[in-house]
Image (cartoon, rainbow, N blue to C red):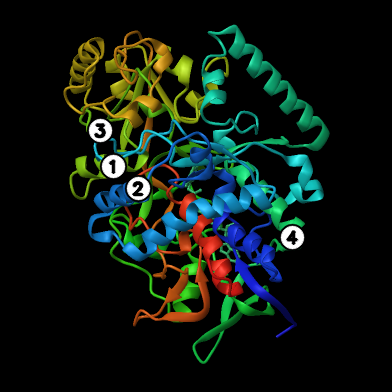
Amino acid sequence: MAATETCDLLVIGSGAGGLSAAVTAAHLGLKVLVVEKEAQYGGTTAWSGGWMWIPRNPLALDAGIVEDIAQPTAYLRQELGAQFDAERVQAFLQQGPRMVEFFRSQTALQFIDGNSVPDFHGRNPHAAKGGRSICAAPFDGRSLGAHIQQLKPPLAETTLWGMGIASGAELRHFFNALRKPASLWYVTKRVLHHFTDLLRYRRGMHLVNGNALVAGLAASAFAKGVEIRTSSPAQRLLVEHGRVLGAVVNGTEIRARRGVVLACGGFPHDAARKQELLDHEHWSAASRGNTGDGLRLGESAGGQVARDAVQAAALAPVSLVPQADGSFAHFPHLVERAKPGLIAVTANGRRFTNEADSYYDFVRGMLAATPSGAPVQAWLVCDHAFIHHYGLGAVKPAPIPMGAMLRNGYLQRGNTLADLALACGIDAANLQATVQRYNQQALEGRDADFAKGETPYNRVQGDAGAGLANPCMAPLAQGPFYAVKIVPGSLGTFAGLRSNASAQVLDARGYPIPGLYAGGNDMHSVMGGTYPSGGITLGPAMTFGYIAAHHAAGVDL
Ligand SMILES: Cc1cc2nc3c(=O)[nH]c(=O)nc-3n(C[C@H](O)[C@H](O)[C@H](O)COP(=O)(O)OP(=O)(O)OC[C@H]3O[C@@H](n4cnc5c(N)ncnc54)[C@H](O)[C@@H]3O)c2cc1C
């Protein structure tokens, strides 16, 4: 072995799961080292929306939204069913608000509220219409100094010239830029600032969403003396007499007096594990460095990967965007499906689910609609007015030109629905009949087939400003018509190492493995593979990181 180093806590992986533990542990006085396999830190977290589901969070309380812990507990009990693990759920719900208070009062990471963001499943009587989510507040990248160079930039396909766009009011401005002078003014200023940053710093400095979350966490980590060592893959754990003592990283033995946190982002790009745990071909939009290392490291020390999740991944529809080098970027469809004037159909030309439901529910609908053995795929179909206003997947709204996306085959276009159906290989007669029926229902504002627009979540995702009877429904009126093919993918994985309420990894008998913690998606999701609300990966990742750090430091919560 080349060399030996020593720290108190070794954190493997630099997404939300790892960095939350690192910042908290350093605050509690531990010497912390974060090792990151990629050349840049941030993982999928840096590509994410940065939303965290934290019921009873301090920002909701500040706004007068007060609920008893029994409410979110009841919501989760109904959502999770047999997967409800009372101990871990209580730890998450009790410590989540404390975690937020810790970060906002003691670190550089600040938050904005989600007080009007509803839970996914409004028919659950315990669902909230808002107040259970928070997002990372925009962050000035300049305060990271030279460390900004190693911050993973946002996922290119979801940005405009590399500029992340915050959900909510900012995104609405971008959609309305050609309609409202105030929005045009906002967008012009924002784009000009961005180009000034590109000239000066070669990247945008007004960081939003998950990029702001990682930047805030990293800035806090650096301020508390944490080293984030990039291009440093953990290769194996050091285990003696059942206790984890550290890891071998890039050939160096790193001893960790208080333990090791596995936070390698689950297995979205581990072909073998995907084949074992997912029943379909799967294109994850998560970071490519997440190849299941943490799960394998955990298993090498006796950890157990859960195999009973409702879904092993955080399902989301993905389209494959051709790249110049012949590869495909995986674009997650999180925003436009609920907007008015779009339907999703399978090759038989028929709708199969409520397009405005969550990405997870949408893909479950896709899977259920696909006969066994057939490829799981569908098309998002819209008319010209829609794509002009909202864009479609990786195709941006006007005035950004769409020619390149037509030429590379990502976007299909037809002057008539029949032409479009032919280009995509969809049953033309059925597609025409589907659109005719849908258009009639859109005029009435009621989706008799799939109840689109009937939950608070659907409506928030729609377009309330469009003045429609149903904010998620408008006729597909005037050609040309457009389509993008979608396939099943995910935002990350849910199935992970079985852990207890202190984030300790458990062995086959259910006992904690001394010195070993799981964080982020390396920990088996507290949601058990269900998806009750947006932010249910980052919320628990931040909370259990905070919990793991306290446990490792020997500080009671
Ligand atoms: C477009 C998009 C939007 C999303 N929006 C949201 C949202 O708003 N809210 C939400 O809750 N979830 C969201 N998600 C999902 C969320 O981003 C992930 O679930 C979350 O970031 C996972 O965090 P993590 O810490 O487990 O992993 P990551 O953030 O992926 O970090 C893991 C890190 O570990 C590193 N690593 C892997 N192996 C090793 C090794 N051997 N040694 C060292 N390092 C290693 C990886 O390179 C990576 O940097 C979104 C996902 C996407 C793709």
Q: Which is nearer the N-term, disc 4 or disc 1?
A: 1
- Is the residue marked 3 within 8 Å of ligand 1, measured from its CB? no
- Is 405 rendered above or below residue 223? above
SS class, disc 2: helix
Q: Which mark is residue 72?
A: 2
The tag earlier along the polypeptide, 1 or 2, is: 2
Determine which of the numbered discs, if any, sits on residue 126 in the image: 1
Q: Mark 3 or mark 2: name the one nearer the start of the chain.
A: 2
Query: Can residue 37 be seen by looking at this rendering?
Result: no
How far is mark 4 from mark 3, CA to CA? Answer: 52 Å
Q: Are marks 4 and 3 in contact (CB under 8 Å)?
A: no
Quadrant of image for the N terminus: bottom right
Residues at badges 1 and 3 in contact (C-beta under 8 Å)? Answer: no
Of helix, strand and loop, which one carries label 4?
loop
Tell me the distance, in whole angstroms, between the alpha carbons under discs 4 and 1: 40 Å
Q: In the image shown, does 440 or 130 lie closer to the viewer?
A: 130
Depth-wise, is mark 2 or mark 4 nearer the camera?
A: 2
SS at mark 3? loop
Query: Where, by quadrant of the figure, is residue 493 drawn?
Result: bottom left
